[in-house]
Amino acid sequence: MKHSKSLLTASVALIGMVLVSLPLYAQSLALKVNIPFEFSVGQNTLPAGTYTVEKRGDLLLISDRNGNSATVLSNATQNKAYKLESMVVFHRYGDQRFLTEVRWSESPAARALMETSAERRLAKAITAEPTNVAAISR
């Protein structure tokens, strides 16, 4: 009887964990992108490489297989790539690039990142040139 009660409790806990995680999974979008240059995201500077970009609610998680990563808050914005091609968008000021937007082809909303103080300083001196990098997979 005691064993049955413990098994029932464990089963209920496991079902609860699965049900709680389903909405998070449903709201998660991911894409893989090869970024051929060093770039800034939030307060982090990441080296060139192949990154996974995941959307979890308002958070964007950017990571590679070498342990380089950043997590930043983002805002919904109109997706100019809806039903076209998934991509990440950067602002380039001279040789510095800042991640500014992530667009998933299957989502009508893209995610925009706020300008950092470093980007604002550069924007006062140099006009930004947009750089789009297409995703290599989803």
Image: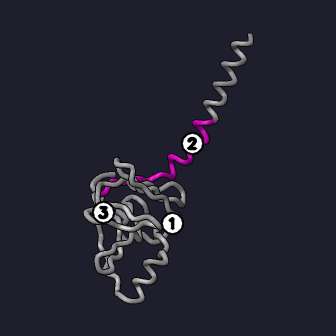
Horizontal and vertical percent for residue 16?
64, 35
- The residue where tag 3 is placed is 85
Amino acid on which the number 2 mark rests in the picture: Ser
- Point out the frontmost of discs 3 and 1: 1
Judging from the image, the colouring scheme is one colour
Amino acid on which the number 3 mark rests in the picture: Glu
Q: Is residue 1 magenta?
A: no
Q: Residue furthest top?
A: 1
3D distance between C-alphas at marks 1 and 2: 21 Å
- Total count of labels: 3
Q: Residue at x 61, y 42 (%)?
A: 20
Q: Callout 2: few (<14), some (14-19), or many (20+) C-alpha neighbours within 10 Å? A: few
Which element carries disc 3, helix, strand or loop? Answer: loop
- Point out the frontmost of discs 1 and 2: 1
- The residue where tag 2 is placed is 21
Horizontal and vertical percent for residue 129?
31, 80
Task: Using the image, determine if residue 78 lies above or below residue 7.
Answer: below
- Point out the frontmost of discs 3 and 2: 2
Q: Which residues are magenta?
A: 17-33
Which numbered disc covers residue 74?
A: 1
